[in-house]
Amino acid sequence: MTVGIIFHGIGTPKRPLEQDEAPYWISEDQFRHVLDMIVALPDPNQIRISFDDSNVSDLEIGLPELSARGLVADFFVLTGRIGQAGSLDAPDIQTLQQQGMTIGTHGVDHLNWANLPADKLHHELTASRATLEEICGQAVTTAGIPFGAYNAAVLKALRQVGYTCAYSSDCGKMDPNAFLRPRASVQGKMTNADFRALIAGHLSVKRKLRRFIGMTRKRLT
Ligand SMILES: [Zn+2]
């Protein structure tokens, strides 16, 4: 089994933050510490590392620290922010790709896909992919679901337009061959013990039950 973890921003933000976003930013020390914990595992490849929101810290801090440890990651890009201050631009995305990283979509804008009408959802999934395919010169087939907000219609739309997998934020362990792949966010308030539990994919019995019920409900409704 694999464990998926998500980084958002590292260090000091270089753009105004959205409401409720600040807890997902971590310090450079925290970032390096989590990566060091991963490389110390018997099999570091059992951790699937993601970066959401395409902050410029992905390139400036994320890439060199990953590369120094022989790690790779999936970068889920908001195409509406490409080239804006504090966000990745097209050459940054190409650099990540050239260094062995996978580029996926996080949508055009940072929207809750579960709340969108079908046509707007279709636009988020296809326009963002077209932009990334143009930049990357190859197929883009993975999506990181913004805010982990999905329902049956979102999963169906992702499959219909040709995505091969979708990464959520349901925590716990993932089947690396499944279409829907849960991940857990690294947060600034977390302690080293929290990081260890996150990387191990540990959930209490109560949280496991809540996760099972939550994922079943979201898949079906
Ligand atoms: Zn996001």
Image (cartoon, rainbow, N blue to C red):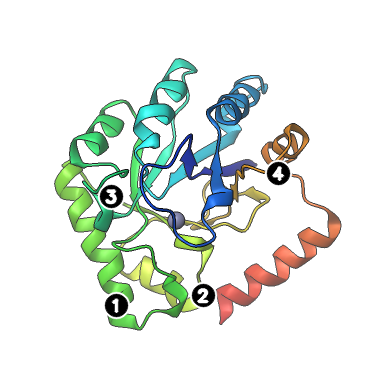
Q: Which amino acid does label 2 sit on?
A: Asn
**Which quarter of the picture shows residue 98?**
top left
Mark 2 or mark 3: whose residue is earlier in sequence: 3
Q: What residue type is labelled 3?
A: Val
Residue drawn at x 74%, y 40% is 194
Image location (x, y in percent) of residue 193: 78, 35
Q: Which amino acid does label 1 sit on?
A: Lys
Query: How many angstroms separate mark 2 from mark 4 (CA)?
Result: 23 Å
**Which quarter of the picture shows residue 196?**
top right
Residue drawn at x 37%, y 56% is 106
Of the numbered discs in the image, which one, if any, rests on residue 151?
Answer: 2
Q: Is residue 47 left or right of residue 106?
A: right
Mark 4 or mark 1: whose residue is earlier in sequence: 1
Residue 63, above or below 137: above
Quarter of the image with the C terminus is bottom right
Residue 197, above or below 149: above
**For mark 4, does the 10 Å Cα neighbourhood hold few (<14), some (14 to 19), or many (20 or more) residues?**
many
Residue drawn at x 58%, y 35% is 47
Of the numbered discs in the image, which one, if any, rests on residue 140?
Answer: 3
**For mark 1, does the 10 Å Cα neighbourhood hold few (<14), some (14 to 19), or many (20 or more) residues?**
few
Q: What residue type is labelled 4?
A: Gly
Could you say which is closer to the camera, residue 140 or residue 105? 105
